[in-house]
Image (spheres, rainbow, N blue to C red):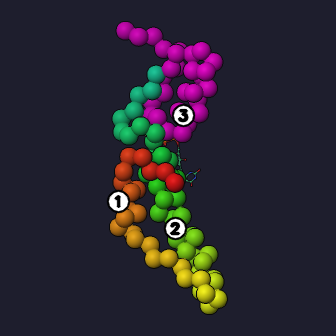
């Protein structure tokens, strides 16, 4: 049986901040995760939202220049969704 100073249940941002600081301070830390490592933000929340939202924000900005010769790009929604479903979403 292993002994730990701290055990985190769930590997989301709350754990991330605590676990790394405690490990850096020399504590023995365990993380128990029932789903995907990284929690909501990394896998389904913030990062995934930025992947889907980001291109539309850029396009909206460019659309303001439409009448002075700047063409806003087409966005391939299916390709974005496919990328979001991969395990390593980042931009
Ligand atoms: C669509 C969406 C967009 C978001 N956008 C933003 C944003 O732009 N900015 C922002 O600041 N916040 C955003 N959030 C909120 C952010 O994701 C949360 O505030 C953050 O993830 C909370 O972190 P947490 O560690 O408390 O919980 P979580 O990240 O939810 O982690 C909890 C983990 O615990 C695990 N778990 C639960 N029960 C058990 C168990 N019994 N045994 C083992 N493991 C267990 C879960 O599987 C999960 O991995 C967004 C959320 C969503 C849904």
Q: Nearer the viewer, residue 89 or 48?
A: 89
Q: Nearer the viewer, residue 6 or 65?
A: 65
Give the number of the disc on residue 16.
3
Instruction: Read off the magenta span.
Output: 1-29
Front position in the image: 84 or 30? 84
81 left or right, relative to 8: left
Residue picked out by circle 2: 55
Direction bottom: furthest residue: 67
Query: Does label 3 or label 2 sit earlier along the sequence?
Result: 3
Q: Name the residue located 61 percent from the left edge and 87 percent from the top edge.
A: 69
**Seen in the image, is 74 located left or right of residue 58?**
left
Instruction: Say whether residue 28 is magenta.
Output: yes
Task: Using the image, determine if residue 27 lies above or below residue 78.
Answer: above
Q: Earlier in the sequence, mark 1 or mark 3?
A: 3
* SS at circle 2: helix
Badge 2: residue crowd in 10 Å (few <14, some 14–19, many ≥20): some
């Amino acid at each position: 049986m292993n002994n730990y100073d701290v055990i985190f249940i769930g590997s989301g941002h709350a754990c991330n901040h605590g676990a790394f600081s405690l490990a850096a301070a020399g504590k023995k830390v365990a993380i128990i995760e029932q789903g995907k490592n990284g929690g909501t933000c990394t896998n389904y929340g913030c990062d995934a939202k930025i992947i889907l939202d980001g291109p539309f924000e850029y396009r909206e900005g460019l659309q303001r220049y439409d009448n002075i010769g700047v063409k806003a790009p087409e966005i391939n929604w299916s390709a974005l969704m496919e990328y979001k479903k991969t395990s390593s979403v980042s931009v």
